[in-house]
Image (cartoon, rainbow, N blue to C red):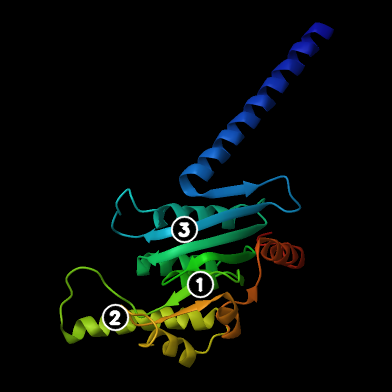
C-alpha cells in the first residue's frame, strides 16, 4: 500500500514538474516572439506588453526593421481582457510610429478595456505612438523620452486631387479627436504642434520631451517604471472586478 502511494506521489510530482516546465517554455516563447511577459510572482498578476520599433499594418516590412505586428497584439489584448487572473496591463512604448490605421485600431482596443492599464513612454512615442500612449487609463513618460507630433503622411504614389486631401483631413481629425478625448491636451494646442513649420527641417510638426508632454496635458505624469507600476497597483486595488 505504501509502495503504491509513493508511485502516485511520484506521478503527481512528474506532472507538476512537466506543467511547470511547459509554462516556462510558453513564457519564453511569448517574450521572444511577441515581446510580452506575464509576471506571476508579484503583488498582482501583471501582463507587460511592449510596443517597439515600427508598427506593422497591412504590409509586411523588411526583416531589417524592428516591428510590432498588430495581428499579434489584437488577440493578446482580447485574451488579457477576458482572463480574470490578469489584474493589470503595463504597456511599454518605444516606437517610431508606423501604420496609422493599425496603430489607431490598437489604441481604440486599449482605451475600451476594463482591465486597469498604464502606459510608459521610454525612448520615443512618435507619430501614431501618441494615441497609443494616451490610450491607457494612466500615462507616464520618462524625462529623456520624446514624442513627435506631425500631420498624417502617406508613402508611395499619391493622387493630387481634392478627394485625397479630404481623406487625409478626416484621418487627421480621427487621431486628434482620439488624443484629446483620452488626454488633457487642448485641440488648439495639438493642432498648433502638428502644423508647426519652424522646428523640423524635413517635415511639419513638433518634438516634445517628457516634461513638456506633461505640461501641455498630453501625458499624465512624469516618472519611470517604479512610478508606473505603483500607479497600476493602486488602480488594481481600487477598481471593481471586471466581470462577475
* Foreground residue among 145 and 192: 145
Of pointers 3 and 2, the one earlier in the residue sequence: 3
In front: label 3 or label 2: 3
Which SS class for mark 1? Answer: strand
Instruction: Indicate which label's residue lies in the foreground, 1 or 3.
Output: 1
Name the image quarter holding the N terminus.
top right
Q: Quadrant of residue 3?
A: top right
Classify 10 Å Cα crowding around label 2: few (below 14), some (14-19), many (20 and above). Answer: some
Residue density around tag 1, few if under 14, some if 14–19, many if 20 or more, within 10 Å:
many
Residue with the mark numbered 2: 168
Q: Is residue 87 above or below residue 228?
A: above
Residue at 61%, 59% (x, y): give it.
89
Q: Which residue is mark 3?
A: 52
Secondary-structure class at tag 2: helix
Q: What is the C-alpha distance between the residues marked 2 and 1?
A: 25 Å
The C terminus lies in which quarter of the figure? bottom right
Between 209 and 113, the one lying in front of the other is 209
Label 1: which residue?
Answer: 146
Q: Quick one: label 1 or label 3, which is nearer the N terminus? A: 3
Q: Is residue 177 visible?
A: yes
- Work out which residue is located at the far right of the displayed protein and give it: 2
Amino acid at each position: 500500500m505504501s509502495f503504491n502511494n509513493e508511485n502516485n506521489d511520484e506521478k503527481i510530482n512528474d506532472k507538476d514538474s512537466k506543467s511547470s516546465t511547459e509554462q516556462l517554455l510558453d513564457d519564453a516563447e511569448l517574450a521572444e516572439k511577441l515581446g510580452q511577459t506575464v509576471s506571476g510572482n508579484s503583488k498582482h498578476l501583471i501582463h507587460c506588453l511592449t510596443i517597439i520599433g515600427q508598427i506593422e499594418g497591412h504590409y509586411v516590412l523588411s526583416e531589417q526593421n524592428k516591428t510590432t505586428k498588430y495581428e499579434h497584439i489584437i488577440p493578446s489584448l482580447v485574451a488579457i481582457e477576458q482572463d480574470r487572473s490578469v489584474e493589470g496591463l503595463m504597456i511599454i512604448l518605444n516606437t517610431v510610429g508606423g501604420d496609422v490605421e493599425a496603430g489607431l485600431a490598437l489604441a481604440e482596443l486599449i482605451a475600451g478595456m476594463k482591465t486597469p492599464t498604464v502606459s510608459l513612454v521610454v525612448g520615443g512615442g512618435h507619430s501614431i505612438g501618441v494615441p497609443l500612449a494616451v490610450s491607457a487609463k494612466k500615462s507616464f513618460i520618462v524625462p529623456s523620452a520624446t514624442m513627435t507630433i506631425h500631420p498624417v503622411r502617406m508613402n508611395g504614389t499619391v493622387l493630387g486631387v481634392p478627394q485625397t486631401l479630404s481623406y487625409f483631413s478626416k484621418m487627421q481629425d480621427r487621431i486628434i479627436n482620439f488624443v484629446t478625448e483620452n488626454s488633457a491636451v487642448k485641440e488648439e494646442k495639438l493642432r498648433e504642434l502638428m502644423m508647426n513649420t519652424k522646428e523640423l527641417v524635413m517635415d511639419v510638426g513638433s518634438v516634445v520631451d517628457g516634461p513638456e508632454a506633461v505640461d501641455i496635458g498630453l501625458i499624465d505624469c512624469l516618472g519611470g517604471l517604479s512610478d508606473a507600476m505603483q500607479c497600476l497597483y493602486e488602480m488594481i486595488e481600487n477598481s471593481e472586478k471586471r466581470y462577475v
